[in-house]
Amino acid sequence: MVFRLPQPYNLQTKGTPMPPKIPTHLFTGFLGTGKTSAIRSLIAQKPQHEQWLIIVNEFGEIGIDGAVLAENGIPVAEISGGCLCCSAGAQMDSTIRAMLKKNTPQRILIEASGLAHAAGIIDELRAPEFADTLDIAAVFTLIDPRQFIDDNYAQNPLYRDQISVADVLVASKLDLCTSEQIAAFRAKAAQLFPPKSLVAEVQNAELDIAWLATPTAEKSRYRIQALPENTLGYQSQGYTFPAGRDFDGEKLIQFFNDLPQFTQGLVRAKGVFQVLGTWVWLNWTDGQWGANQIAWRRDSRFELIAQAFDADEIERRLNDALEAE
């Protein structure tokens, strides 16, 4: 369905149905992982009746990727000279506004610079002025498995940011990897938290257009899919809370401190939570818990593994830790 955005586009005339939000996909990944090739592969599969917009961010002053993508007749806007969430952030806002005034897209694809802070871009896209217009759909991060298993990359905040924010983690450059490196990638990717909605391995950065519809949200309560060596009767449970609801930091600390008292045989508990507008990762193991900032932006969630616990009671305590609406 093609629709016209009202002017101004984030306002609604009384009695007029609000147009559907535009699925907006971010493509991120370190330098040289194949982001432009991946978008080109999707363009080749695009249904003829759909109108797409593409926004390309390059760190240098002269943009090349935008020129490559523009050959396909799809409107392309290029933002050069910085990261979309930093020096080029204001350009992104104005570019989106200008593109939406001229076009009626059904999908937007944004290619971030390999040096971009992915979480910051998502924060920009979730600005109030775009709240009724853009739907942050599946986020794609392309990686080279050799870098992914390299501790030097894992310690880089920018690289961790790009991995953390992904809904779909795409391994490219497989032809340059040994079988041992691919096996190490698979093992490490399976341990990521929050888990990815999809982990894919591709040749020549060729993506499947069906991956654009990858679900991005868990049910409010879910079972952990992979429970290691469950020979002692361990139980698992996960909980999710929508982005936009802040947790009270002090109440979360109290929740983690009290956790061993209302579970039996607790072996692991971890979560990502939105607190005061930012996101933190909390991890309980071996009787200790720690906290770090994280780039995840999709939802707040908590998982635990223990021999026995009251799932309803844990959900009640987590809800009690939410800030009042």
Image (spheres, rainbow, N blue to C red):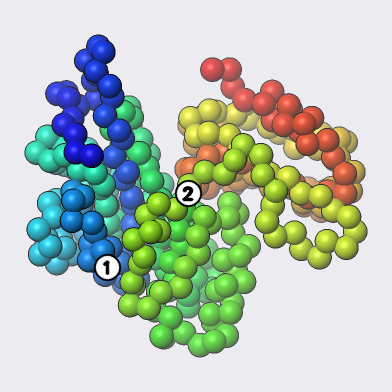
> Is residue 31 something that shows in the picture?
no
* Residue occupying image coordinates x 47% and y 49%: 215
The tag on residue 215 is: 2
Considering the image in quadrants, where does the C terminus appear? Answer: top right
In the image, taking residue 257 as reference, residue 26 lies left or right, namely left
The tag on residue 41 is: 1
* Residue occupying image coordinates x 20% and y 43%: 105
In the image, taking residue 35 as reference, residue 213 lies left or right, namely right
The tag on residue 88 is: none
**Which element is circle 1 on?**
helix
Residue projecting furthest to the top: 14
* Residue occupying image coordinates x 41% and y 86%: 176
Q: Earlier in the sequence, mark 1 or mark 2?
A: 1
* Residue occupying image coordinates x 25% and y 47%: 108
Q: x, y (%) of residue 182?
A: 53, 80
As shown in the figure, which amino acid type bears the numbered disc 1?
Ser
Q: Is residue 151 above or below residue 125?
A: below
Q: Nearer the viewer, residue 18 or 133?
A: 18
Q: Is residue 244 above or below residue 300?
A: above
Q: x, y (%) of residue 2?
A: 19, 38
As shown in the figure, which amino acid type bears the numbered disc 2?
Pro
In the image, taking residue 151 as reference, residue 317 lies left or right, namely right
Q: Nearer the viewer, residue 310 or 43?
A: 43
